[in-house]
Amino acid sequence: MINEAEWENTMLDWLGDLDWKSGVGSNFESERASLSDLVLHDEFTQALRRLNPSVPDQYLLQAKADILQARSMDAVAEN
C-alpha cells in the first residue's frame, strides 16, 4: 500500500521528468483572478494554442470556457 506522501513524491518526480515545475501557490497570485481561482488562465490558453495551432482563437476560447464550466455539483463526475 502506498501512502499519500509517497504517491505525491512519485507524481512530482514524474511531472518533473516532463519539465513541469512545482511551486508555492502564493508565487502565482499575480496570475490568478482571485486566490480561490485554481486555473492559471493565461497558461491554460497558451497550452491550448500550443496543442491546437491551427484552431482559430474564438474556438479555443470557447473550448476553454466549456472545459472550465462545471456541469454538475458532483466533483467525481466532473473529473
Image: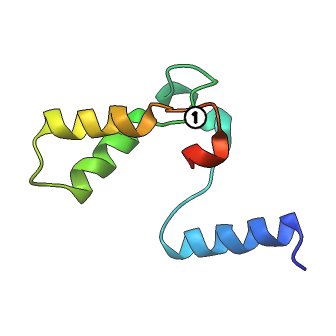
Q: Position of residue 32 (x, y in %)?
A: 51, 27
Q: Is residue 16 above or below residue 1?
A: above
Kindly indicate the quadrant of the structure image that contains residue 45. Answer: top left
Q: Is residue 19 above or below residue 45?
A: below
Q: Position of residue 51 (x, y in %)?
A: 25, 58
Quadrant of the drawing holding the N terminus: bottom right
Q: Amino acid at mark 1?
A: Leu
**Residue at the extreme bottom of the image, as rendered:** 1
Q: Is residue 7 left or right of residue 22?
A: right
Q: In this figure, which residue is indicated by the disc labeled 1?
A: 38
Q: Badge 1: how crowded within 10 Å, few (<14), some, or many (20+)?
A: few
Q: Position of residue 66 (x, y in %)?
A: 35, 35
Q: Is residue 40 above or below residue 14?
A: above
The count of marks equals: 1
Mark 1 element type? loop
Q: Position of residue 28 (x, y in %)?
A: 56, 35
Front position in the image: 73 or 16? 73
Give me the residue at 48% from left, 72% from top. Answer: 18
Q: Is residue 68 left or right of residue 11?
A: left
**Residue at the extreme top of the image, as rendered:** 34
Give me the residue at 51% from left, 32% from top. Answer: 70
Give me the residue at 68% from left, 43% from top. Answer: 24
Give me the residue at 57% from left, 34% from top. Answer: 38
Kindly indicate the quadrant of the structure image that contains residue 22. Answer: bottom right
Q: How is the image coloured?
A: rainbow
Q: Is residue 20 left or right of residue 13?
A: left
